[in-house]
Each structure stands twice: as C-alpha cells, then as structure tokens.
Image (cartoon, rainbow, N blue to C red):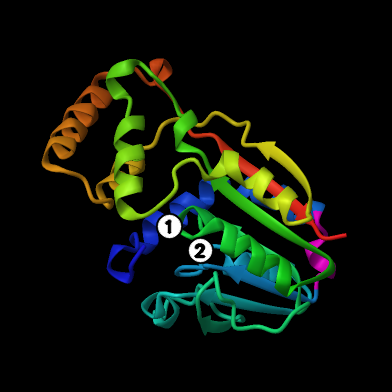
Amino acid sequence: MNEAALPAQALLKQQAGWLAPARARLLRRVGIARRRRVLDLACGRGAVTGELVQRGSGTVVALDRARQALCEDTGALAGAWRICGDATRLPFADDVFELVFCQLALMWLDATAAVGEIRRVLCPGGVLVAVEPDYGGMIEHPPEIATCDLWLSALRRAGADPHIGRKLPGLLADAGFRTRVDLLERLQSPSAARFDLLRGLPLTGAEKRSLRQIEAADGTCAEAGRVVHLPVFLITAELP
C-alpha cells in the first residue's frame, strides 16, 4: 500500500484494538518480556509499536517503507528506533532480532520474500508473531450485508493478498519454522468502521454503489441478527 493510501490513524487504532486481546496472548506466549531485540515489521503509524516498547525489555525497531508514517508526530512510535526500509530486503545483518512482530502487514508484501528475510534476521530460538487475516473465509449474515466480494476484489486491486492467512503456515514450514496456528475465536458486534476501511480501498463505481446499498441494509438489521466475522490467523513461528 502506498503512503497516500494509509488509513487514518483513528481507524488503525480501532483495528488494533479489536485484535488487542489475541495479540496480548501471543506476546505472552513467546515471552516478550525477555526478548531484548524486537522488530515491528511494516509498523505503519505505530498502532502496536507502543505495546511492544512497553512490554519488551530491550530495543524495539519500528520499520516501514512509508516515510510519511514514520515521521508523523503522534507519539505512537515513542521509545522505538524508526527505520524506513523494505520488509522484503531488510537493512539488518543476520541473526539480529529475538522477536519479529507483524500485524495485517504480510498481506501487503511479497510474503515469500518477507518470510525469507524474517528468517535471516532472527537469531536461533527467535520467534515471529504474525496476525494476518483471510478475507476469503468471511462469515456474514444476513446476505444483504455481505461485503466479502468487495473486499476480495478491492484488496487484489490494491496489491494485497486477501488469502494470506491460509498460505502463511505452509510458507513458514517451508522456511524451517516450528509453527503454531490459532484462529481469532471471539465473535464481536459488527462495527461501521469496516465500511470506512473498505472505502479506503480502490473501489469501482459499481462497487461503491453496492457498498452504499450494503450500508443502508446494515442500518436496518437488528443488532442481534447481524453476524460479521473475519478469520484472523494468530501465528507464532519459532526458529530451532
């Protein structure tokens, strides 16, 4: 995603908030408090960087290719070293980091190249924590509020892989990681912010009209009758 297409900071924070409980469990599982060198890969505007700084016990490096995101004075990146760089050609030596974290990032990258670079910069015993969605498995009810097809087409048009979640376990196994995969299990009330996020993607005129119709239908549905669930893969992958 290019710099101009970055979602608003408020939307990024809300998105990070939805994933906060699951993310906390993963970080506890890998012992973030004892990890001395942490990389926040494709950190964007730092929606999670502050958590890594607060919970870690050493250096946090926040890397993103969007210089604009790294330079914004929001305080979100306070306490971290900021580096503008490409996640598929990391500007670090081998065996540098004990933990690499990424959230909703690998879907925007050449995942095979990124996984290879993550493996290279992780030291033996280092771990990757990845939180990535799979839009192909969305569950939506009733049918008139379904946005799955819009997400799939718009994400592909924007250069993302909407099925990255299901692909990552195999990519990591091929790279030599020992991988554990969980799925986001909590069903939350559908948020109107999902429409704002979708509007930030390159929609065609017909898709914009469909989205307006879906929003209108969503407003008429009873709260208890709406189900919107995006499968999110919660991955911890350790190097032997």
Quadrant location of the N terminus? bottom left
Figure check: 42 above or below 234 = below
Q: Residue at image x 25%, y 47%?
A: 199
Q: Earlier in the sequence, mark 2 or mark 1?
A: 1
Q: Quadrant of residue 2 in the image?
A: bottom left
Residue 122 located left or right of residue 4: right
Give the percent coordinates (x, y) of residue 87.
Answer: 54, 70
* Residue indicated by mark 2: 47
Figure check: 141 above or below 149 = above
Q: Residue at image x 24%, y 20%?
A: 220
Residue 157 located left or right of residue 164: left
Residue 91 visible in the displayed image:
yes
User: Does the magenta portion include 32?
Assistant: yes
Give the residue at the far front of this rendering: 174
Give the percent coordinates (x, y) of residue 83.
Answer: 53, 83
Say which amino acid is labelled 1.
Leu
Figure check: 14 above or below 226 = below
Q: Are marks 2 and 1 in contact (CB under 8 Å)?
A: yes
Numbered disc 1: secondary structure: helix
* Residue indicated by mark 1: 12
Distance between the alpha carbons at the discs numbered 2 and 1: 6 Å
Say which amino acid is labelled 2.
Ala
Q: Nearer the viewer, residue 46 or 6?
A: 6
Quadrant location of the C terminus? bottom right
Give the percent coordinates (x, y) of residue 82.
Answer: 54, 83
Numbered disc 2: secondary structure: loop
Range of residues picked out in magenta: 30-35
User: Does the magenta portion include 208?
Assistant: no
Figure check: 40 above or below 238 = below
